[in-house]
Amino acid sequence: QVQLVESGGGLVQAGGSLRLSCAASGRTFSSYAIGWFRQAPGKEREFVAAVTWSGGNTYSADSVKGRFTISRDNTKNTVYLQMNSLKPEDTAVYSCAASVRVGVPTTPLSYTFWGHGTQVTVSS
């Protein structure tokens, strides 16, 4: 069992930066791949980025590639999403999730445990 809590969201102007954190409880945190997803009002949940259990491999959606960076620190049971050059279309609730799948899963069904999310709002 893994419990996930996101933090770091807020209101930022276009072009600004935010760093989201996903803090996990549970001794087996380092066994899970961790992904970030986002959901804007009226839209489906969208994959953002994922990192393998070791942190050795990451994958990001084309829409955020070059602007967002995912990383993890297993000594702190935390995964980070550094978001730079933010755009109004990045506005959404961002959630992290844990998966037992190998690699960097990109579909929500691949993830077992979810956090409640943190709101990110980018003003133009």
Image (cartoon, grey):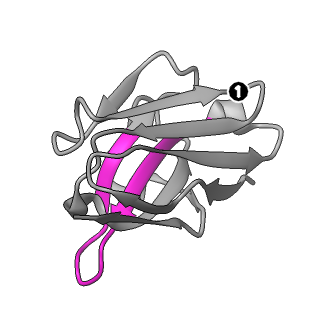
Q: Which residues are magenta?
A: 32-49
Q: Residue at x 32, y 31 (%)?
A: 59
* Residue nearest the viewer, comparing 120 with 94: 120
Q: Main secondary structure of the magenta part?
A: strand
Instruction: Tell me if residue 105 can be seen.
Output: no
Residue 57 at x, y = what percent? 41, 20
Badge 1: few (under 14), some or many (20 or more) residues near its Cα, within 10 Å? some
Name the residue carrying label 1.
74
What's the residue type where badge 1 is placed?
Answer: Asn
Identity of the residue furthest to the left in this view: 62
Instruction: Tell me if residue 115 can be seen.
Output: yes
Residue 123 at x, y = what percent? 29, 66
Q: Residue at x 31, y 52 (%)?
A: 47
Q: Residue at x 47, y 40 (%)?
A: 81
Q: Is residue 93 left or right of residue 13?
A: right
Identity of the residue furthest to the right in this view: 27
Q: Residue at x 65, y 32 (%)?
A: 31
Q: Quadrant of the N terminus?
A: bottom right
The number of callouts visible is 1
Q: Secondary structure at mark 1?
A: loop
Q: Is residue 79 left or right of residue 23?
A: left
* Residue nearest the viewer, comparing 107 with 11: 11
Q: Quadrant of the C terminus?
A: bottom left
Residue 23 at x, y = what percent? 70, 47
89 part of magenta stretch: no
**The quadrant where residue 82 appears:** top left
